[in-house]
Image (tube, rainbow, N blue to C red):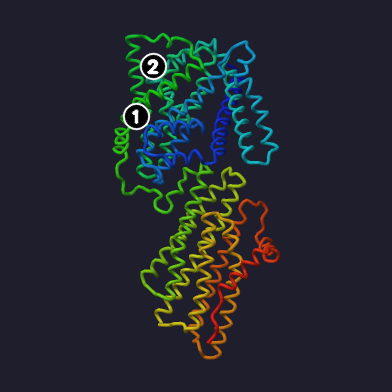
Amino acid sequence: MDFFNVLSLLGGLAFFLFGMKYMGDGLAKLTGGRMERTLERLTSGRIRAVALGAGVTAVIQSSSATTVMVVGFVNSGIMKLRQAVGVIFGANIGTTLTAWIFSLSGIDSGSFWVKMLKPSSFAPIVAVIGIIPVLFSKKDGKKDVGAIMVSFAVLMEGMEMMSGAVAPLKNSPEFARLFTLFSNPVAGMLAGAFLAALLQSSSASVGILQALCSTGAVAYSGVFPLILGQNIGTCVTALISSVGASKNARRAAFVHLYFNLIGTVVFMGLFYGVNAFVPFAFLDETAGELGIAVIHTVFNVFATAFLLPFAGLLERLACLTVREDKNSVSRTGEFKLLDSRFIEKPAFALEQCIRTAENMAREICVAVYEGISLLTDYDKDKAALVVEKEELADRFEDELGSYLVKLNAKGLSSQDSRTVSKLLHCIGDLERISDHSLNLKETADEMHGKGLKFSKQAAAELAVFTNAVKDIFAIAVQAFVNDDKQEAALVEPLEEVIDRLNDELKLRHIDRLKNGECTIELGFALSDITTNYERIADHCSNIAVCVLQMGEAGFEAHDYLDRMKSDDENFKRRYNEYKKKYVLPECD
């Protein structure tokens, strides 16, 4: 090999790895989190878990990605360790599909139709078809399909470049001698493990091996241990991912390691044990792309079939390796769904964000309703609960906001990007609402401590205002949790009525002050309450507008509200209905 052959080999390797990564990412993006949801809803059936693990991995083209996702599920408490074992087994079978795709490059025939099956023949066609939606389509789904097709073509072109670059090695005795070193099972296994660990992908390392074997100068005796070792090396990704995770998540990563390690040792022991007495003739034959795919598949199917009955023992072995650790750090409780491993699958990660935001809204409901109830029925335990929920809301905003910012840096579709924007705005408004519930609690503290009570008339008026605020908050939360635009459209008319109630209540309060029917201290308390009520309603309006904004690019909130208030007949009708429903009682 000369300098230019080496350059071509490195360039082919770059194309190959680039195509493999972006094809896998594109497939994951195209599925929109459906593969991950399938795993998440997994039942306890071990055979079904293996089948699902194999199917998901075959679709996203990466056992490492599947295993890392499983580690995330276990870390978040979504999946039990027992369920994860079956998925990990299946992932090793699913990843063999990639080697079969690569083996197509070894097809050799004079027939036109058979030649068309070669990647070098159909990859350019796939690239031309794929680039059209990438350049001209405005739909994310079509762009994703096009990107997958182009990535596949780049991947196959990389394979062809590597095969062409190493072609001069066909007649090189040094190259042949290099692979004879790997005929030693232990040396070959370690070399294969190192290569897969370096690339963090057994599929990529098998593909490179297939390209090297296209020279026809390598025997199966030299590549057999390499293929088996590559299955061990791919475990590095999951092990790295499990650092800092919960003990069960780390156990899931070790299950992956033990599966491949034990499977490799047993398979090699049986194979070379039999070979010592009944030599396998194929070991001296020239290795080809198809043969490598067959060996890769046979090993993983054998390992799964052999170890599946002992899955419980494998689980216990992982538990012995990772013992109970009181100091282990992991996300639990309210934030368990925000696992950093999910960010590599943005569509699924976004679903976890939505679910976490819904949990945040429900917690804040408790703070708001208890904060309001303290004004008429003071209780120290309820007051402490409001403080607890407000602090929790602060944590929700920090944790979820930071996670969403990281997620937004990933390649999101335009729809998902708008969802992230909606969540960032809404969690901010929800947190502000929790602040106002704390303010109401502090006002209730003061009134209770000083023995202050509103007059019968003031209490009756405040009750009407309170009911309106409770209703607008309930509607806004319902619209947010269910992403219900019809519910969201009910918020703004009620917010206008609340503004009117606030103004009228203040005027009546001033009249009572003039007539000596109200004290200055009660006046301050009433002002604090009405101000917080009015601001809760404002934040409810913001949430509703965000829900309505979803799916409308270029949506401008102020223009929408102005247009709705002036032209929308439904808005006027609802406003009048709320105006009749929330009427302050007549003054005595």
In percent of the image, x 44 and y 22: which residue is there?
297
**In which image quadrant can residue 389 be found?**
bottom left
**Labels 2 & 1 near each other (Cβ < 8 A):** no
Around disc 1, counting alpha carbons within 10 Å, would you say few (fewer than 14), some (14 to 19), or many (20 or more)? some
In percent of the image, x 54 and y 33: which residue is there?
24
Give above or below for 391 relative to 332.
Answer: below
Image coords of residue 344 (percent x, y): 51, 41
Around disc 2, counting alpha carbons within 10 Å, would you say few (fewer than 14), some (14 to 19), or many (20 or more)? some
Image coords of residue 528 (percent x, y): 51, 76
Residue lying at the far bottom in this picture: please name it.
515
Which quarter of the image is occupied by the N terminus?
A: top right
Seen in the image, is 385 located left or right of residue 168? left
Q: Amino acid at mark 2?
A: Asn
Judging by the rendered image, the residue that carries numbered circle 2 is: 184
Q: Which element carries disc 1, helix, strand or loop? A: helix
Q: Earlier in the sequence, mark 2 or mark 1?
A: 2
Q: Which element carries disc 2, helix, strand or loop? A: loop
Q: Amino acid at mark 1?
A: Leu
Judging by the rendered image, the residue that carries numbered circle 1 is: 308
In percent of the image, x 68 and y 38: which residue is there?
137
Give above or below for 462 relative to 144.
Answer: below
Using the numbered discs, state the Cα–Cα distance from disc 2 to disc 1 in whole angstroms: 29 Å
Image coords of residue 338 (percent x, y): 46, 49
The one nearer the camera, 169 or 568, is 568
Seen in the image, is 402 located left or right of residue 280? right
